[in-house]
Amino acid sequence: MPVPDRIRAVLESAHTVEQLAAVEHERWAHWQQYVHDQCERQEDGSLVIPADLAARWQVQIETKYAELSEREKESDREQVRRYLPVVLNALMI
């Protein structure tokens, strides 16, 4: 089903894109802080990811969404829910 031009224009507007980009940055920063907190900081400032976490995250990277555990899927859903208020607000035209 094609997206009506009016809805496409709103969702692709600079304002909506900026709002979604802000949400994305917050999501990314939160994840990066989590990753950094799990790592061992070296004297030179670099970070070492523990082997067990690197292995676990690699498996998750290689796993299709449909094959994730319900807990992992819910984590992804929680992230999507961060975007929905911006989308819903944009569509209230």
Image: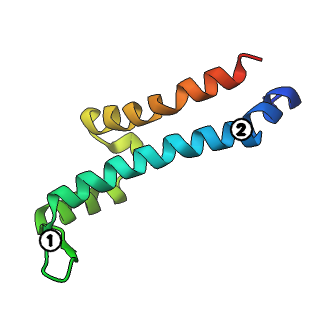
Look at the image and tell me in which quarter the C terminus lies.
top right
Residue 52 position in % (x across, y down): 12, 63
The residue that label 2 is drawn on is 15
Location of residue 41 (image quadrant) = bottom left
Q: From this viewpoint, which residue is outermost toward the right?
A: 5
Q: What mark, if any, has residue 63 been given in the picture? A: none
Point 38% across, 38% down: residue: 76
Residue 71 position in % (x across, y down): 25, 34
Secondary structure of residue under mark 1: strand
Q: Disc 2 residue type?
A: His
Q: From this viewpoint, which residue is outermost toward the bottom?
A: 44
Q: What mark, if any, has residue 41 been given in the picture? A: 1
Between 65 and 93, the residue placed more toward the observer is 93
Categorize mark 2 by other alpha carbons within 10 Å: few (<14), some (14-19), many (20+).
few
Between 58 and 35, the residue placed more toward the observer is 35
Secondary structure of residue under mark 2: helix
Look at the image and tell me in which quarter the N terminus lies.
top right
Residue 57 vertical placement versus 85 (above, below): below
Categorize mark 1 by other alpha carbons within 10 Å: few (<14), some (14-19), many (20+).
few
Please indicate whether residue 57 sits to the left or right of residue 62 in the image.
left
Location of residue 4 (image quadrant) = top right
Point 33% across, 47% down: residue: 30
Between 51 and 33, the residue placed more toward the observer is 33
Q: Report the label total.
A: 2
Between 85 and 53, the residue placed more toward the observer is 85
Residue 14 vertical placement versus 41 (above, below): above
Please indicate whether residue 5 sits to the left or right of residue 64 in the image.
right
Residue 7 position in % (x across, y down): 79, 27
Please indicate whether residue 15 sits to the left or right of residue 75 in the image.
right
Q: Disc 1 residue type?
A: Arg
Mark 1 vs mark 2: which is more N-terminal? 2
Residue 55 position in % (x across, y down): 19, 64
